[in-house]
Amino acid sequence: MQTLSFAKGHATHNDFVILVDREAMTPLSADTVRWLCDRRGGIGADGVLRAVRSELIPEWQGKPDLWFMDYRNADGSIAEMCGNGLRLFVRYLLDQGLVDAEPVEIATRAGLRKAWACLDGRIKVSMGRVRVAEQPTWIESNGRRYDATTVDVGNPHAGVRLDDVEQLRALDLSVAPTFDQAVYPAGVNVEFVVPVAENALQMRVFERGVGETQSCGTGVVASAAAQLHSLGRQTGSLTVTVPGGALKVDVDDDQAYLTGPAVVVAQGRVTLPKQ
Ligand SMILES: N[C@@H](CCC[C@H](N)C(=O)O)C(=O)O
């Protein structure tokens, strides 16, 4: 049995267990991730963030001296990117003195990301180039089929626009939405969105590998980019309110940025079950 240090935190109530495994001594099995994320039998979280030196990650071809964010969903699956997780990861590394120079550079499966600590305590992260597909698709939820927009934020998203906030509140997201498997062979994160002002959206999300969460950083960026696209705009700034709080998205000619809170709430030791 292995005993490790862990931290637990959240970013707009999208919560994560953080494990520091600098020398890549503790590769995580899907079972272990499921156990860590179990809210009754384990610590409880939407996902796990494992911090490993980037030179020890064979798939990472960039700078060798960074922290690599090895992100896992609560069901044990691997995802390319996690926007809320990235902000919490950076908050933790800064608090622990494990990074100093800003921007903090982090290696992820979706590529290099940069982060800045804002004076008000929030963390701003670069989210890469966001791609909004022209070809519409569909999502089925609560017995209804909706038109949906595909957005790539390093991980896959499908955005559904609803008419009003009442409709958004009434959705039952305890049941997974269904989608076109040919469009999303590796699954998809589904966002339901209502524009509530010129530069403001409300959103709920059903995350691939997790279920409904209180927030999804990549989903918030996908929704903002889809909204700008629907207005014929490439750039702009939006506030997106999710059940767990509010996030700011800025899209410029090169890429998107996500700004919001990230809080470490506990630290301790965890004994992992036999892997
Ligand atoms: N909560 C995340 C997204 C995590 C990954 C996602 N569930 C996937 O499978 O792509 C975020 O804040 O972006």
Image (cartoon, grey):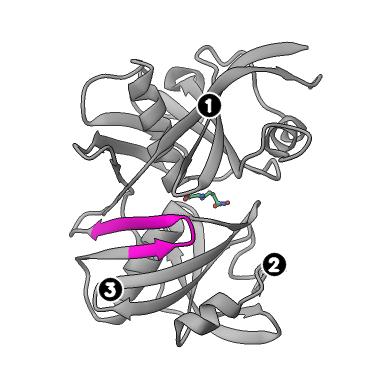
Q: For the residue marked with disc 3, what is the amino acid?
A: Leu
Q: Nearer the viewer, mark 2 or mark 1?
A: 1
Mark 3, other Cα within 10 Å: few <14 / some 14–19 / many ≥20: some
Can residue 19 be seen here? The reply is no
SS of the residue under disc 2 = loop
Mark 1, other Cα within 10 Å: few <14 / some 14–19 / many ≥20: few
**Residue highlighted by disc 1:** 266
Give percent across and percent down for residue 40.
76, 38
Residue found at the far right of this picture: 274
CA distance separating discs 3 and 2: 27 Å
Left or right: residue 7 versus residue 187 is: left
**Residue highlighted by disc 2:** 176
Left or right: residue 122 versus residue 26 is: left
Magenta residues (range): 240-250
Can residue 142 be seen here? The reply is yes
> Can you say whether 14 is above or below 190 in the image?
above
Say whether disc 3 or disc 2 marks the residue closer to the N-terminus.
Answer: 2
CA distance separating discs 1 and 3: 38 Å
Using the image, tell me which numbered label, if any, was put on residue 133.
none
Q: Quadrant of residue 267?
A: top right
Give percent across and percent down for residue 210.
65, 52
Say whether disc 2 or disc 1 marks the residue closer to the N-terminus.
Answer: 2
The residue drawn where x is 51% and y is 47% is 14
> Can you say whether 146 is above or below 4 in the image?
below
CA distance separating discs 2 and 1: 31 Å
Mark 2, other Cα within 10 Å: few <14 / some 14–19 / many ≥20: some
The residue drawn where x is 42% and y is 36% is 263
**Residue highlighted by disc 3:** 228
Q: For the residue marked with disc 1, what is the amino acid?
A: Ala
Give percent across and percent down for residue 220.
40, 60
SS of the residue under disc 3 = helix
